[in-house]
Amino acid sequence: MSWRLANSLVQLRKQINEAFPERDKSSDGSIGDRAHQGRPSDHNPNAAGVVTAIDVDRDFNDGHDGRELVSALIAARDPRIKYVIFERQISVTGDITKWKPYHGKNAHNHHVHISAAADRNLYDDPSPWILDFGAKVKPQDAPGTPVPALLKRGSRGEAVRSLQKALIERGYIPAGKADGSFGPKTEDAVRTFQSANRLQPDGIAGTMTLKALGL
């Protein structure tokens, strides 16, 4: 079946690429894979043969992250947005300012999913998006972001515990304990993991390191 991407999302992706020309695109997507084809999904073409969803890799490089895109979309409150999924959270359909936990198999930690509204007048509206990537807007009613964009010496909490468990499972913290406190042993383990995976061995668990660990 022939298909095309909704014009509104073509424009959105164009603006993201222009704002972050060096961004990682390995987790980008539009048309659904075989798993999507077996269930209802905006990644599948609608009756008109139009795909109304895109995935945008969260790693924008140069210290930028997909959270800046989510904040910009929340600030814009564009009616062309149906919903957004990111970091185990999903926005309420038709109201991107309100969020709730997302329980799908894919946590969407590595990319931002954006679905366009079902109305053709909206999903095919090619008007430029008003995107302020410097916006500091947080979703209302959000349960809290489970994985910070950056973990380093001194960080504490469940995100650090998840990091430590991943390192223990891979043998980088032998006989270690996931105590949720990012100390020197965790830093050394992160640095060793980074060296083994051709990442900058700075001992800081940023976007690329968390991604490599499956977090």
Image (cartoon, rainbow, N blue to C red):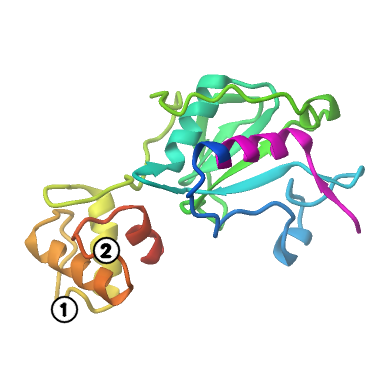
As measured in the structure, the alpha-carbon distance from the residue carrying label 2 to the one carrying label 1 is 22 Å
Which SS class for mark 2? loop
* Residue 97 horizontal/vertical position (percent): 52, 23
Which segment is the magenta one?
1-17
Mark found first going from the N terminus, 2 or 1? 1
Relative placement, left or right, of 167 versus 118 is: left
Taking the image as drawn, is residue 190 in sight?
yes
* Residue 105 horizontal/vertical position (percent): 56, 58
**137 versus 115 height, above or below:** above
Which SS class for mark 1? loop
Question: Three-letter amino acid code at disc 2?
Answer: Gln
Residue, disc 1: 174
* Residue 134 horizontal/vertical position (percent): 41, 26
Crowding at mark 1 (Cα within 10 Å: few <14, some 14-19, many 20+): few
Residue, disc 2: 200
Q: Is 2 inside the magenta-drawn segment? A: yes
Q: Is 85 inside the magenta-drawn segment? A: no
